[in-house]
Amino acid sequence: MRLQGKSVLITGAGSGIGKCTAQLFAAEGAEVIVCDIDAAKGEETVAEIAAGGGTSAFLQADVTNPESVQAMVKAAIERFGRIDVLFNNAGISGVGAIHEVEPDVWDRVINVNIRGVYLPSKYVLGHMMERQSGNIINMSSCIAEIGLARRASYAATKGAVLALTKSMQVDYAPYNIRVNALLPGTIMTPFVENYLRSSYADPEEGFASIKSRQLTGELGRPDDVAKAALFLASDESKFMMGSPLYIDGGVVFGKNA
Ligand code: NAP
């Protein structure tokens, strides 16, 4: 029960890493606000948490829309009285080199992945500053640290989230608010499965390409990231401030050739 008594808001909690984290956090005693753009998937996360004996509520929001995010944060505070931890997890992928990416696709990736961190943070921070206490986890990616082919828009956003995390930490340290970032490698979620389906005729080819970047032959799983998020959300990481936490099977710091 490492999160007993904490209220946690997770964006994009209807699928993949966000869903797995919501389930783990609830099992560790947190009250979880499950936020997603997709109501059916968000409600499913809540039903699964309830079946496991945990406490959560679904609140729909589009993290790119200020009115939607502001209303969701207000409802979350009304429901649970406070937000101790904000996990800015929602994000979308973007495939293509610069010359291949159309402006509307570029804007969408930038919007969801950067504005989608800015807006929930903006509306939760006033509340955390008032309480002189808070913890924000931003979802970056190990792509912020390495060059990877044909991911221009996505890499730009995840690098921005890492820089934003450090800047936020400096601004909000005086309010006893910690801000850290998660940098996963490739994690098997619907997000990656869709990408593999659209990019490779044979999924095994895709798996081989992922493994070739790692120092382990194992594929990353949502609970690998959820456990790292648990550490950042808990007081066990109280001396971590503005830090990147890598969960990447050795992609960033390993060299196997
Ligand atoms: P996922 O399975 O697609 O889950 C993301 C969730 O966010 C989905 O339920 C999605 O809904 C929701 N979402 C998308 N746009 C939204 C919006 N505007 N407002 C609210 N919710 C929205 O993806 P995942 O793999 O778990 O990824 C979660 C995060 O981890 C992302 O930020 C991703 O960039 C990051 N990440 C993933 C990996 C990986 O290999 N999987 C690696 C590094 C970092 P829809 O399905 O309806 O769009």
Image (cartoon, rainbow, N blue to C red):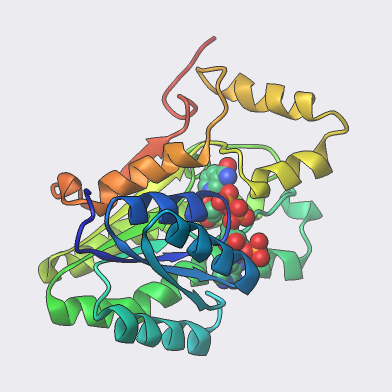
Give the number of marks. Answer: 0
Furthest residue to the top? 257
Q: Can I make out residue 28 in this image?
A: yes
| Image position, residue 54 (x, y; %) | 36, 59
Is residue 173 depicted above or below 124 in this figure?
Answer: above
With respect to residue 107, does 230 lie above or below?
above
The residue closer to the viewer here, 163 or 210, is 210
| Residue 94 image position (x, y, % from top left) | 68, 54
Confirm whether residue 112 shows in the render.
Answer: no
Q: Quadrant of the C terminus?
A: top right
Q: Left or right: 22 with respect to 196? A: left
Instruction: Give coordinates of residue 48: x percent, y percent.
Output: 51, 57
**Residue at image location 31% in from the left, 87% down from the top:** 78
Q: Residue at x 77, y 24 (%)?
A: 204
Residue 197, picture quadrant: top right
Q: Position of residue 164 (x, y in %)?
A: 37, 61
